[in-house]
Image (cartoon, rainbow, N blue to C red):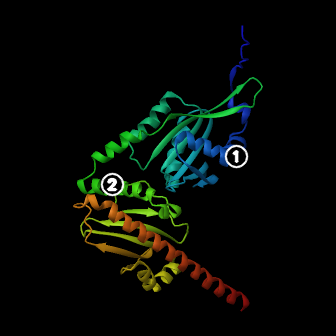
């Protein structure tokens, strides 16, 4: 008889034996990049850490993070014990205080009434909000190292939400959503665009934003169904840089080969529209429209990077003169 392989026994380890103190041990462990990635993988979200013990009024949320591709705010509340009403209230309070779109409640054991509560929240909120209830488990085989495991017990039913949201949309809103869905598909095929940008999740809006790698501004793709226009925009949050960009508008127009429409409100910026592009009546031309927008937004980003570099050089020289005086 052939030798039988030696098999070990799987044992579940008490989480408190691994992390005696929730804040000092578990939260610090979870905030490490590889462990936060593990939690994100379980929830199908790419998480990036922003802060730990982040203030919410007189309280503090354990971990404040963001979704990497959308920059949607995420709060993570830890509870190394059975769920209770106190922590259920906390996650809602913290989500409101941080303006979070994603809530992850990590617990030792989820009680049925709290599983039902998270399920209810997911069913009665739209796709801008997502609630996850996750059990943290630790397992070991014989004398091998202990292994953590995140078990998602409640999460949003995104398919059901998408269908419900779609059924609630007007015809124009449906067209906007489908246009931006097509944009995401086209963007994935555009190598030049993909090197600099990652599209946000499609919404039924007349715009979709793009991170530009700057704290001073972001970029926007635009559609106007009434005026039959498509366009791109540079939206500047920094007042001084906004004035600088507006003063150099002609350079942007020359680079893009199209006239710009400036605006000066809480934010400042320039919009570039192309008329005669009716997305309602020309669905078959959407890839052509989108290709123009991708090329324009790439050219606009190149110019904005150049202008920001010039602006920083001017600011540095002005600061040096002030210091010398």
Quarter of the image where the C terminus is located: bottom right
Q: Position of residue 111 (x, y in %)?
A: 53, 29
Q: Is residue 193 left or right of residue 167?
A: right
Q: Position of residue 256 (x, y in %)?
A: 41, 78
Q: Is residue 58 left or right of residue 209?
A: right
Vertical position of residue 229 compared to residue 14: above or below? below
- Residue 167's quadrant in the figure? top left
Vertical position of residue 91 compared to residue 185: above or below? above
Disc 2 to disc 1, C-alpha distance: 40 Å
Total labels: the figure holds 2
Q: Secondary structure at mark 1?
A: helix
Are there few (<14), some (14-19), or many (20+) residues within 10 Å of tag 2?
Answer: many
- Residue 204's quadrant in the figure? bottom left
Q: Quick one: 58 or 318, which is closer to the camera?
A: 318
Quickly name the residue at label 1.
28
Identity of the residue drawn at 33% across and 74% down: 273
Q: Secondary structure at mark 2?
A: helix
Q: Position of residue 97 (x, y in %)?
A: 52, 54
Q: Residue furthest bottom?
A: 325
Identity of the residue drawn at 49% across and 72% down: 301
Q: Residue furthest top?
A: 1
Visible residue check, residue 12: yes
Q: Quick one: 142 or 106, which is closer to the camera?
A: 142
Q: Quick one: 230 or 83, which is closer to the camera?
A: 230
Q: Position of residue 157 (x, y in %)?
A: 41, 38
Quickly name the residue at label 2.
177
Q: Judge depth for marks 2 and 1 and give the one in front.
A: 2
Identity of the residue drawn at 66% across and 34% down: 148
- Is the Cβ of the residue at disc 2 closer than 8 Å to that at disc 1? no
Q: Residue furthest right?
A: 143
Q: Quick one: 283 or 64, which is closer to the camera?
A: 283
Vertical position of residue 323 compared to residue 93: above or below? below
């Amino acid at each position: 008889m052939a030798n039988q392989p030696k098999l070990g026994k799987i044992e579940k380890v008490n989480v408190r034996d691994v992390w005696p103190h929730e804040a000092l041990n578990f939260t610090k462990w979870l905030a490490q990049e590889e462990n936060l990635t593990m939690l994100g993988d379980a929830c199908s979200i790419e998480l990036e850490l922003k802060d730990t013990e982040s203030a919410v009024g007189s309280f503090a949320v354990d971990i404040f993070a963001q979704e990497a591709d959308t920059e949607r705010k995420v709060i993570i509340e830890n509870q190394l014990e059975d769920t209770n009403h106190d922590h259920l209230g906390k996650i809602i309070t913290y989500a409101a205080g941080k303006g979070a779109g994603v809530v992850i409640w990590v617990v030792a054991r989820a009680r049925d009434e709290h599983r039902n509560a998270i399920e209810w929240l997911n069913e009665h909120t739209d796709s801008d909000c997502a609630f996850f209830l996750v059990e943290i488990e630790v397992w070991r085989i014989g004398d091998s190292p202990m292994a953590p495991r995140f078990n998602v017990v409640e999460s949003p039913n995104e398919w059901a939400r998408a269908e419900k949201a779609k059924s609630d949309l007007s015809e124009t809103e449906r067209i906007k959503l489908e246009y931006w869905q097509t944009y995401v598909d086209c963007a994935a095929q555009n190598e030049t665009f993909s090197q600099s940008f990652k599209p946000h999740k499609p919404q039924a809006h007349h715009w979709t934003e793009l991170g530009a790698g700057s704290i001073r501004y972001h970029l926007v793709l635009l559609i106007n169904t009434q005026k039959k226009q498509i366009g791109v925009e540079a939206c500047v949050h920094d007042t001084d840089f906004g004035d600088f960009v507006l003063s150099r508008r002609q350079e942007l127009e020359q680079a893009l080969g199209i006239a710009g429409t400036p605006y000066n409100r809480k934010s400042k910026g320039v919009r570039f529209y192309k008329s005669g592009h009716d997305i309602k009546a020309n669905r078959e031309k959407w890839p052509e429209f989108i290709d123009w927008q991708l090329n324009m937004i790439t050219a606009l980003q190149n110019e904005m990077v150049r202008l920001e570099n010039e602006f920083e050089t001017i600011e540095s020289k002005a600061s040096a003169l002030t210091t010398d005086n």
